[in-house]
Amino acid sequence: MVRVSAIVVAAGSGTRFGTAKQFATLRGSRLVDIAVDAAHQSCDEVVVVLPADVEWDGAPVAASVRGGAERSDSVRAGLAAVAPDTEIVVVHDAARPLASSQVFDAVIGAVRDGADGAVPGVPVSDTIKRVDGDRVVETVDRASLVAVQTPQAFRADVLRRAHASGSDATDDAALVESVGGTVVVVPGEPANLKVTNERDLAIAESLLSEANRS
Ligand code: CTP
Ligand code: MG
């Protein structure tokens, strides 16, 4: 029986990066392969979501499916391919090559412990201001803010319900919140950056070198 399924979303176009960054390499491995490997360590099956013109040629996965125009469309495509009896679904960005298995286990553990969803969060270190154009409207209290990462874990039935509306959101937790689900935050990892711009790959490389030294 499949208890934990992972969906690795890798169907974006990488507009800010300049190419489909999920196929860029970090120390000789494609970001998507790193993400699929990490997911396999903590989950019973992995579904990978790819651009329409790409055939999966990485490690064996339970399914590879075609993504959609928005990230949430891609998650929905992945969700349709996970085992029907799965209990927990973990959604992970292919663009986050430094997520550790501890963070996968932490979000899965929080859902096993009763939450509908669990997300890794890290404290915000910059001062955050709400603006209207170039005018500052207010300074937001940073103590009550976290920056949220993937992997994110959810009870499968709640995630299916959240996605049934077909709405868009940059993270799945927001959709689960919108259907009344309880989402908890577990400690994220400052190094778990999302490769967004070209220089982020170099940053990821130097974080890896640093980790190997200690
Ligand atoms: N993603 C996806 N399907 C989409 C959009 C995004 O599967 N329609 C995936 C990306 O491949 C990535 C993750 O969601 O692994 C996070 O998205 P993001 O960092 O925004 O990647 P892109 O959308 O590819 O980049 P950009 O927004 O710069 O175009
Ligand atoms: Mg995007």
Image (cartoon, helix red, strand yellow):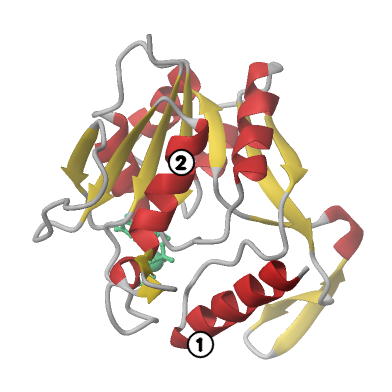
Name the residue beneath numbered marker 2.
39
Instruction: Give the amino acid at mark 2.
Output: Ala
Query: Which disc number belongs to residue 30?
Result: none
Callout 1 secondary element = helix
In the image, 173 versus 93, the foreground residue is 93
Using the image, tell me which numbered label, if any, was put on residue 199.
Answer: 1
Where on the picture, by quarter, is residue 107? top right
Name above or below for residue 21 compared with residue 80: below
Mark earlier in primary sequence (1, 2): 2
* Most distant residue in the bottom direction: 134
The residue sitting at 81% across, 77% down in the picture is 126
Q: Residue at x 23, y 51 (%)?
A: 58
Percent coordinates x, y for residue 175 in the rendering: 50, 38
**The C terminus is located in which quarter?**
bottom right
Q: Can residue 178 be seen at all in this image of the molecule? A: no
Residue at 41% across, 35% down: 6
Task: Tell me if residue 153 can be seen.
Answer: yes
Q: Amino acid at mark 1?
A: Arg
